[in-house]
Amino acid sequence: MIDETPSPSGSRLLDILREAPAHKIVKMPDADHGLAVEEPFPFLAVVGQQEMKLALLLALINPTVGGVLLVGPRGTAKTTAVRALTDLLPNVQRSLCVHGCTEEIVELEGMEAICEHCAQKFAYGEPLTVVDKVRLLDLPLNSRLEDVVGGINERIALEQQRVRLERGILGHADGNILYIDEVNLLDDAITDAILDAAAQGSYTVRRGPLKLTYRARFVLIGSMNPEEGQLRPQLMDRFGLRAIVRGLDEPALRYQAYEHAAAYRRSPEQFASSFAGQTIALAEEIQAARQRLPQVSIHQEARDLGLQLIKQMQIESNRAEITLFEAARAHAAADSRDVVEVADVQAVSLLALRQRRSDYLRQFFAEQAHEDETMRSFWEQQRP
């Protein structure tokens, strides 16, 4: 049963995350009906790992944080937590048109900004969008480049003797979440395609004389084990939040994690149902926080301290400010507040700013400054 006592802040999202009754497990019978497991592991049943769970929730509330990278050894529930987001994914307005026409575009840019077909539909009062749930898409490591960006439909080419381009995983990820496990092991060609799509919000496929451009505005979530190799700096820069995921320290928590895993294996549906009430409540709070987000502003003190921290860390990239303040806005929205306070900036600072300081760049700029000073001194000596 869910405790209905309101939190002091007025929001239950962060309270649900902090106080999830992960210890409450019912005795479950062994059952095997020969079916593949489709019920995801409950998000709130993941024991500990508050930093990882907070980072994922912030990305659901505010996609502009720039995605999430989970870094840690094997067996620390990284993939489990990401796939557990399935039951928490919010609803969005999704275009019914292949060109992405929406009522919002008409309001902002006029009828000329949408295609002719949608302009006719809009004139007759027909909807251009539909409410749909955000989806979680996996990008397997064994994917080919054509699977990722799209290519020629070979079946249609052989059967109908005509060539048609079809979008790949990146195109289908538009407006959704794209998850890449072991992202540091991706093929370089696929990594380049993801970087291009993430930077532009779209990508172009060319096959001979055919050329099509697809929208690709997605939230990128990746997980990796640093023992298996480092992530390319270009791709690392595309992840807004970076969560360090370590093994649980307390023996009691480790045994609790074992109990949850065993109970889930015995009966995934029954195990998930024991967390259903709080999962529904958390999903509703995420949706409410997303709706509140546009009204959230940043207090002057929070802004100043955040900028001072970035300067103190000697971070060059302006993506630091974007991630820090957008994550802080999501944190405030999760707590039912319309103003970002210092505590919000502090709560997300590790996630937003770690691994952004570059020793190489500091050395490079120091050497460059010395070289510039040498040239300035030369010209000073030439003055009469």
Image (cartoon, grey):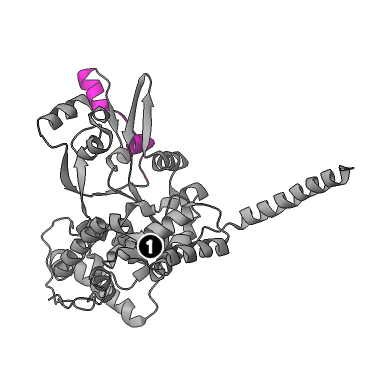
Whether residue 181 appears in this view of the structure is: no
Dot 1 falls on a residue whose secondary structure is: helix
Give, as a single range, the part of the protein colored magenta.
Answer: 142-161
Of residues 205 and 372, the one drawn nearer to the viewer in this rendering: 372
> Residue at the location (52% across, 65% down)?
309
The verdict on residue 146 being magenta is yes
Q: Is residue 342 above or below residue 163?
A: below
Q: Is residue 82 above or below residue 191?
A: below
> Residue at the location (11% across, 72% down)?
29
Q: Which residue is mark 1?
A: 328
The spot of residue 165 in percent (x, y) is: 29, 27
The spot of residue 319 in percent (x, y) is: 47, 52
The verdict on residue 271 being magenta is no
Which amino acid type corresponds to the residue marked 1 in the rendered image? Ala
Specify the quadrant that holds the C terminus.
top right
Secondary structure that dominates the magenta span: helix
Of residues 18 and 149, the one drawn nearer to the viewer in this rendering: 18
Of residues 328 and 86, the one drawn nearer to the viewer in this rendering: 328
Number of residue marks: 1
Residue 373 horizontal side relative to residue 353, left or right: right
The spot of residue 132 in percent (x, y) is: 17, 47
Of residues 29 and 273, the one drawn nearer to the viewer in this rendering: 273
> Residue at the location (20% across, 19% down)?
160
